[in-house]
Amino acid sequence: MTPTSLEQRIARIEDERAIQQTMYRYGYAIDYGSEDEWLSCWAEDAALYWSESPFRGHEQLLAAFRAHTHAPDVFHKHFVVNAQIDVAGDSASARSMFARLDSYPDGPQILAFGRYVDKFVRGADGGWRFSERTAEVESMRAPPEAVLKLMASE
């Protein structure tokens, strides 16, 4: 159903903007190690597909976050662009492109790129959270030495 009233159109724009902000918070939080901010992006029973086996629920999501690299140990940037968002009441879906920029010895380079396929739910507080995120990695290279050293020390 296409919104017709001005109020409906504004509400849709506000929902899309709030969903985009959740997508952006995800990247900022994982890049800079903000555990609470990252966890606030997720519904309690959400699923994250970074690989074949999903991380389900806040406990597993938190474990995935803690196993990931963060500043200041390793600097990288998650980018998300070209989001296509469809809102249907208190749920939504989105598709977007992503890239991760890492610091290699000869300068910044793309580690990976691909597509995110997301599902969102509106919480009781009105905020939008991921109920499911799938990272479809389309190309990836070897991580930079700093990432490999940090992974080996854990």
Image (cartoon, grey):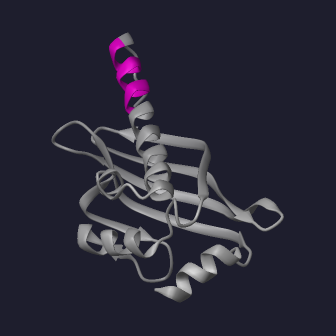
The spot of residue 135 in percent (x, y) is: 54, 66
Residue 148, by quadrant, is bottom right
The magenta region covers: 7-15
Q: Residue at 51% across / 87% down in the picture?
A: 153
Q: Is residue 2 above or below residue 126?
A: above
Q: Nearer the viewer, residue 143 or 47?
A: 143
Q: Nearer the viewer, residue 26 or 54?
A: 26
The image position of residue 136, as x and y in percent, is 59, 68
Instruction: Indicate the quadrant where residue 133 lies.
Output: bottom left
Query: Which quadrant does the N terminus fall into?
Result: top left
User: What residue sits 40% from the left and 23% below the top?
Assistant: 3
Q: Position of residue 80 (x, y in %)?
A: 59, 48
Q: Nearer the viewer, residue 54 or 88?
A: 54
Q: Residue at x 51, y 56 (%)?
A: 31
Q: 92 or 150: nearer the eye? A: 150
Secondary structure mostly seen in magenta is: helix
Furthest residue toward left: 124
Q: Is residue 133 left or right of residue 142?
A: left
